[in-house]
Amino acid sequence: MIRKSIPHIFTLLNLFCGCVAIYLTFSHFFQSALVVVMLGVFFDFFDGFFARLLKVESDLGVQLDSLADMVTSGFVPGAVMYQLFIVSGARNIDYAFQINESSFVFTIAPLALIGFIIPLGAAFRLAKFNLISDKVPYFRGLPTPANALFIGALPLLINHPLMVNLKDYLLTPVGLTVVVVLSVYLMNTHWKMISLKGFDKSSLQEIIFLFVLLMIAVLMFLLLGLASFVGIIITYVILSLLKNVFRI
């Protein structure tokens, strides 16, 4: 019984991290939120790892994993994007309602709701993932955890001293909308994305691709810190695209 529960515990820890990250995001603690999302991704990796290791994979685990990912890797990046729209100048509007003798005021930024298209795209991807029965050595589209790290690192990149010129272009409603659209598209595209589970040690091309990704990741991290996740995920997508184009 305990053995079967171990993967579920890791999945629930992932979900807990997502809940904490939501609070931190709406409190504008973006760096802390990203760190907690990273912790959630860590737990997300190990729930599947232990399920396979202990041979206790189950339909319950699959569904629970997707529900946890929907919060940590779906709603959290949507919340981050909502807050970025607010920072970019999206205006809050008060909507007043009166029911009988009670009055209610509902405050929201309609333009910022574009950010919540990301959770919709993540939900669609996760639902499709649950219906896939065949196991393949690659990801179909950008994994939701990778997308969450990309979106979660955007506030840090925008405010990084080395990226001052980028802020004027990215921190605008148009720039953020483009990011949202690309995010949803990449999560649901049929492109084959690089996966370590499909790494072929006997293939020189595979080794070169992994080495390039690792070296760029290290250099970016040394230069930008946690904000480097934006560049790392972009590099990951580009290398995956090259593999698709040249059928490597």
Image (cartoon, rainbow, N blue to C red):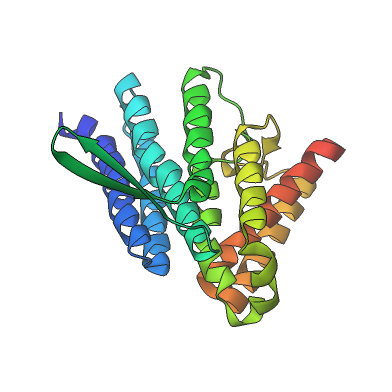
Residue 78 vs residue 190, the one in the foreground = 78
**Horizontal arrangement in the rendering, residue 154 relative to residue 76 (left or right):** right
At horizontal 54% and vertical 44% (from top left) the residue drawn is 114
At horizontal 35% and vertical 58% (from top left) the residue drawn is 26
Whether residue 77 is visible, yes or no, is yes
Q: Is residue 103 above or below residue 27?
A: above
Residue 194 screen position, x and y as percent: 66, 42
Which quadrant does the N terminus fall into? top left
Residue 8 vs residue 29, the one in the foreground = 29
At horizontal 73% and vertical 60% (from top left) the residue drawn is 212
Residue 32 vs residue 182, the one in the foreground = 182
Badge count: 0
Residue 15 screen position, x and y as percent: 30, 43
Which quadrant does the C terminus fall into? top right
Q: Is residue 98 above or below residue 82?
A: above
At horizontal 65% and vertical 76% (from top left) the residue drawn is 163
**Horizontal arrangement in the rendering, residue 165 relative to residue 48 (left or right):** right
Whether residue 45 is visible, yes or no, is no
Residue 203 screen position, x and y as percent: 75, 43
Give the residue at the far right of this rendering: 246
Residue 102 screen position, x and y as percent: 15, 40
Give the residue at the far bottom of this rendering: 161
